[in-house]
Image (tube, grey):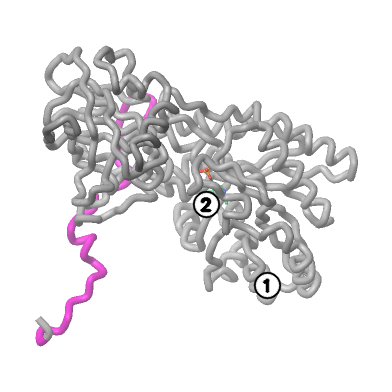
Amino acid sequence: MSTKTRVDARRSQTAAVAATDSSSTTKEDLEQLNFLTPDIAEAVREQFTTPAYVYSLEVLERQAQTALSFPSAYGLTVRYAMKSSPNAAILKIFNKLGLHIDASSGYEVRRAVAAGIPAENISLSSQELPDFFPELVNMGTKINACSVQQLELFGAEFPGGEVGLRINPGLGSGGTGKTNVGGPSSSFGIWYELLPKVKEIVAKYNLKVVRVHTHIGSGSDPEIWQRVSSMSLDLCRDFQDCVTLNLGGGYKVGRMSYEKSTELAVVGKPVQEAFENFAAETGRKLHLEIEPGTFLLANSCSLVTTVQDMVTTGGPEGHTFLKLDSGMTEVLRPSLYGAQHPLVTIPTGREETETASYVVVGHCCESGDLLTPTPDDPEALMERPLTKTEVGDLCVVEGSGAYCSSMSTKNYNSFPEAPEVLVDRQGSLHLIRQKQTLEQQLQNEVALPPDFV
Ligand SMILES: *Cc1c(COP(=O)(O)O)cnc(C)c1O
């Protein structure tokens, strides 16, 4: 990355990050703990070792309730996009609150069923339709065909059956190029211009298209939601059997204090009106589905880590590096997207009033294992002002609930999968996934016959 782009990338940040360049940063300017307290974080380390994911029951329930109050004209189903964090405890908590499930693979469907989720509460929108999809359909799981081939496979197996269509309406609203899941550069869903082909297949197998699904990506702009909902409603016009419109997920959530979160009541209002207008015009009162993952999980989990080493490099280009006992093995998003996660250092056994700027890295032998990348350039590092830190202090990586535990370079360098813990309203800690053992990492390896080695 050129120096110029790096400077521009920096300028695009607000004061909180720009403060990196000044020596006047005070503790008040720093990112704060979300739901943890220093005492609870220390208790997590003592009981479960670090790194450990800690999920807040209170935040999970609050986000679920907010999602359930998304404005809707004629009924709403909220599906939890379980790929964001699929632990059975989380699935059960949401199931109890009345959420259904969006699964992204046949294996996720099986995993949700194993957690006790009724199969008919699960819908599958998958890049790869598994060989065993008929078994899932026979259990009651709903399928959204995400390509022409998937629709053909479904029709051949279930002529006369009910199916959903995931359509790429030609519009996207991604946070970065990599998170854009609508528009011509996205492979997700059936390109809207292929609808004549879709109708041919529907007619050939006498299918009933009962759901239309459009998930266009991580946006928080009400105007985009208005446009996509009216385009999606237009698609429902083409399918007389359609009773449900699913608008997917993609509600952007601020992790850093300067980032904005989507207000569901605001983005949902024009959607509700569009449904009402559609009903006035066609007489069809469509049911609304939404599928948030990030919205439910992003700030529902904090990763507790330990600063296990510090190194410095010299010269004007030099930095002080904090090395955590974690990194891309638990939180890959910074390396993958240049995503910014709040980092909060907690001095143990002493008061600390000073701040200092650090580059924070993970424990893998991999230069991309970086917790403080430049936004949108995962490979360029950036210093972050933090409470002055020593080896042995805690460092909490906030915003670690969505696409962290579920999407990491687990077992790289043979580091074990980290434990997951749930903290309840009383501050009590409940283990919901054990730390992996070495035996578990090795269990699928098969030894060669002795004459080879
Ligand atoms: C990933 C995904 C979601 C959830 O997206 P978020 O950005 O986490 O809200 C919803 N629906 C589908 C089909 C998805 O693939």
x, y percent for residue 20: 29, 23
In this picture, which residue range is highlighted in magenta? 424-451
Q: Residue at x 34, y 33 (%)?
A: 302
In the rendered image, residue 54, in percent from the top left (x then y), is placed at: 32, 35
Q: Does the magenta segment cover residue 450?
A: yes
Please tell me whether residue 208 belongs to the stretch shown in magenta. Answer: no
Q: Which residue is mark 2?
A: 117
Whether residue 293 is visible to the viewer of this picture, yes or no, is yes
What residue is shown at x 13% (from left), y 17% (from top)?
350
Q: Give the quadrant of residue 3.
A: top left
Q: CA distance from mark 2 to mark 1?
A: 28 Å
Q: Earlier in the sequence, mark 2 or mark 1?
A: 2
- Classify 10 Å Cα crowding around label 2: few (below 14), some (14-19), many (20 and above): many
Which element type, helix, strand or loop, lies under badge 1? helix
Up-down relation of residue 226 to residue 453 (above or below): above
Give the quarter of the image for residue 217.
Answer: top right
Left or right: where 140 falls relative to 420? right
- The percent position of residue 235, horizontal first and vertical second, equals 77, 52
Quadrant where the C terminus sits is bottom left
Give the residue type at disc 2. Answer: Ile
On the image, which quarter does residue 290 sit in? top right
Which residue type does callout 1 highlight?
Glu
Q: Which residue is mark 1?
A: 152
